[in-house]
Image: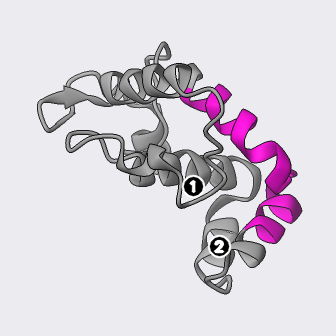
Amino acid sequence: MVRVLNQKHQGNEEFGLTYRQHYQRMKDWLEAHPDDDIANYNSSFYIMDNQTAPTYLVGKIVCYELYKKGGYDALKRAFNTKPTVEDFFAFLKKEIGIDQKDFNQWMRKQIAKYTTQDILPLR
């Protein structure tokens, strides 16, 4: 896992785009829709187009943050969390300190960060 986390993923492509390009597309979309709250799973952000899958890329960031804070044990706890929005955000608050009300801005910052970093979270 450490090896994977330290790899540069500039060459890995999904739908002909690198991860950085997907994060850039997400960032651009979010900048064009500043009032969209991505803490709401019904947000149009999650169906922004047919080329980028924000659900997976947001999940990738969440998993990476959980891994950084609590390792595999935190990831295992995440997968055992009840599948409700309330339980998900309660878990994030407990594990990484992110409230539901702060998730939108926090995730927007994370997405922006991964448009410029060479080392991206998980492969």
Q: Which residues are magenta?
A: 89-111
What residue is pinned by disc 2? 78
Secondary structure under badge 1? helix
- Relative to 10, does residue 67 appear above or below in the rendering? below
Residue 52 relative to residue 59: left or right: left
Q: Which mark is residue 63?
A: 1
Front one among 112 and 76: 112
* Foreground pick, 85 / 69: 85
Q: Going 54% across and 28% down the picture, which residue do you hit? A: 33
Is 97 left or right of 11, judged from the image as shown? Answer: right
Residue type pointed to by label 1: Cys
Q: Name the image quarter holding residue 17.
A: top left
What colour scheme was applied to this rendering of the protein? one colour
CB-based contact (under 8 Å), mark 1 and mark 2: yes
- Residue 118: image tag: none
Q: Which residue, as the protein is rendered here, is positioned at the far top?
A: 116
Q: Is residue 2 magenta?
A: no
Secondary structure at numbered mark 2: helix
